[in-house]
Amino acid sequence: MAKKLGKQTYVMDTPPTIAGFAAIGSKKEGEGPLGQYFDVINFDSTFSQKTWEKAESKLAHDTVELAVKKAGLSYQDIDCIFAGDLLNQCIGSTFGVRELGIPYLGIYGACSTMAEGLMLAAFLADGGGMQNIIASTASHFCTAERQYRFPLEYGGQRTPTSQWTVTGSGAAVVTAGGGAGPFIRAATVGTIEDKGIKDAANMGAAMAPAAAATIQQFFADTGTRPEDYDLILTGDLGQVGSDLLYELLLREDVDIKSRHTDCGLLIYDPDKQDVHAGASGCGCCASVLCSYILPSVVAGRLKKLLFIATGALLSPTSTQQGESIPSVAHLVYITSEPGQGV
């Protein structure tokens, strides 16, 4: 089972395998630089449903179904699914998988949900309690706009610091022992960080301190440096948050810039697509990970990957009450070989 290393990091005794993974996106994602890497691009953002919320649930359902199929398993083989999303009470995920008959554990970490799900799945798989576990999440631009900002019909102007919520989903099947990889070698559980940011249109500024705290803690716990890893991948800080992340870490003499990129900067082309500071949403880092990054690990182009998903833990109610935006970031260390590093 996982062994604690330092203050917040846990190393897997028998690193679980990510046996199957899938990513589905819609029109804007298909037009971006990573469009060709998605398993499915559905140019109908309604996914043939009557509401945007039902569309998000269909997106979540189809991605889980495809990931299980790619893992060579059936629903009966799955011991548990960790799933969540941005909608109130996580109805996108709940309604999406309710007919599958899979034991369900709903989780909420906002845009950090994919890392949280992978981490929890790895803990259970490494501990021997379960064999096959799914980590999944999804988001939809139109549902997020309706819940957190304004209905699309309102036509409100977006600020330069705002990010575009991805209409996309990612799902991964984590399996105990064996397999050809990728492997989940370690994980760092993040702490809630709150620097008093209240601008709900500037998620990058709110989440950057959480990413910095978790990354710094991982290096402190493991005694490693940024240069020990092929890629340090955050999601989804966008341009504003990424710049702040560099500044915060440099204050602690940690320089990740040569190894870092952000899912919110990868999925869209800022020169050709109007996304302002980049992308965001549960489905952003999940779909980037499952479409482009994990295949690079399988192919050997990446051997040591730090995946840090960040989440802003706000709600419409907290924003209306003038609350600040607490955030969290969880780190998952993914490798091409089971015993690499740490």
Image: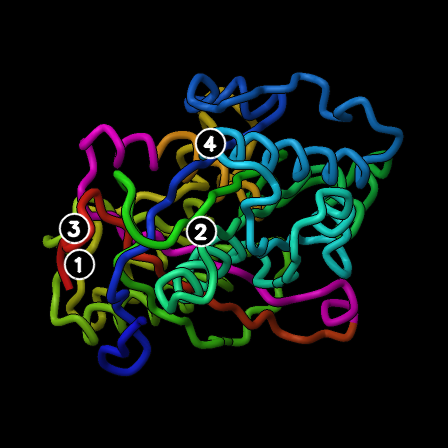
Of the residues under marks 1 and 2, which one precedes in the sequence? 2
Alpha carbons under labels 1 and 4: distance apart: 41 Å
Of the residues under marks 2 and 3, which one precedes in the sequence? 3
Q: Which three-letter amino acid code belongs to the residue tagged 4?
A: Gly
Identify the residue under disc 3.
Answer: 229
Q: Which three-letter amino acid code belongs to the residue tagged 1?
A: Asp
Identify the residue under disc 2.
Answer: 237
Q: Which one is in front, 242 or 261?
A: 261
Q: Which three-letter amino acid code belongs to the residue tagged 3?
A: Tyr
Q: Is residue 311 magenta?
A: yes
Q: Is residue 216 magenta?
A: no
Alpha carbons under labels 1 and 2: distance apart: 17 Å
Labelled disc at residue 72: 4
Alpha carbons under labels 4 and 2: distance apart: 34 Å
- Front: mark 1 or 3: 3
For the magenta stretch, what is the residue range? Answer: 294-320
Q: Secondary structure at mark 3?
A: loop
Quadrant placement of the N terminus:
bottom left
Label 2 neighbour load within 10 Å: few <14, some 14-19, many 20+: many
Q: Quadrant of residue 333?
A: bottom left
Alpha carbons under labels 3 and 4: distance apart: 30 Å
Label 1 neighbour load within 10 Å: few <14, some 14-19, many 20+: some
- Front: mark 1 or 4: 4
Q: Secondary structure at mark 2?
A: loop
Identify the residue under disc 1.
Answer: 255
Please give the name of the residue rendered at 28% of the width and 47% of the height, measured from the top-left corner. 178
60 sits to left or right of 293: right
Q: Secondary structure at mark 1?
A: loop
Label 4 neighbour load within 10 Å: few <14, some 14-19, many 20+: few
Taking the image as drawn, is residue 170 in sight?
yes
Q: Is residue 311 above or below residue 63?
A: below
